[in-house]
Image (cartoon, helix red, strand yellow):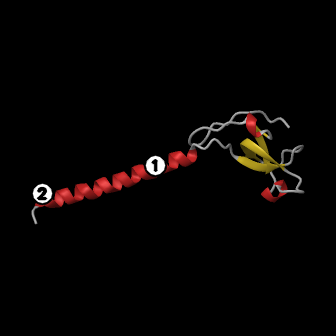
Amino acid sequence: MDSSSTNKRRMRSGAVALGGMGLLAATLVACGSSDEPDKRCAHRSTLEKLNNRECKSGGHGAYYYGGTVSNGRVSGGSFDKSAVTRGGIGGSHSGSSGG
């Protein structure tokens, strides 16, 4: 076996690895660009973040869309899903903390 065939083999395996990485990157971008904003369960009046089961039928919570959680409270989003948008990786959230 000469060195040129060894080099060609290495280049092919490198191309396969790079192709696989491109596919993985495309998959992650597709998953991260959902139109659905982040949601979490929260108490409507206190804005306290609650366990998701509290947003099920009979619970004391409602889904809060977008925003962040700090010190156990939600802020920067809205209980109105249509008031919050999301775009791209990491998302960009906008909206009000209305009720």
Q: Secondary structure at mark 1?
A: helix
Q: Is residue 49 left or right of residue 20?
A: right
As displayed, is residue 10 above or below residue 26?
below
Q: Residue furthest left?
A: 2
Number of labelled discs?
2
Residue 20 x %, y %: 38, 55
Q: Amino acid at mark 2?
A: Ser
Closer to the camera in the image, 27 or 52: 27
Neighbours of disc 1 within 10 Å: few (<14), some (14-19), many (20+): few
Q: Is residue 72 visible?
A: no
Look at the image and tell me in which quarter the C terminus lies.
Answer: top right
Please name the residue shown 18% across and 57% down the image: 7
Numbered badge on residue 25 = 1
Q: Which residue is mark 2?
A: 4
Q: Residue at x 57, y 39 (%)?
A: 88
Across and down, in percent, residue 86 comes to 64, 38
Q: Earlier in the sequence, mark 1 or mark 2?
A: 2
Distance, label 1 to label 2, CA atoms, is 32 Å
Residue drawn 80% across and 57% down?
A: 51
Locate residue 53: give its quadrant: bottom right
Asked if labels 2 and 1 touch by Cβ distance under 8 angstroms, the answer is no
Residue in the picture at 75% in, 40% down: 81
The numbered dot on residue 58 is none
Judge from the rendering whether residue 60 lies leftward or rightward of residue 18; answer left or right.
right
Identify which residue, 67 or 34, lies in the foreground.
34
Residue 73 located left or right of residue 1: right
Q: The N terminus is located in which quarter?
A: bottom left
Circle 2 packing at 10 Å, graded few (<14), some (14-19), many (20+), is few
Residue 12 placement (x, y as % from top left):
25, 56
Q: Secondary structure at mark 2?
A: helix
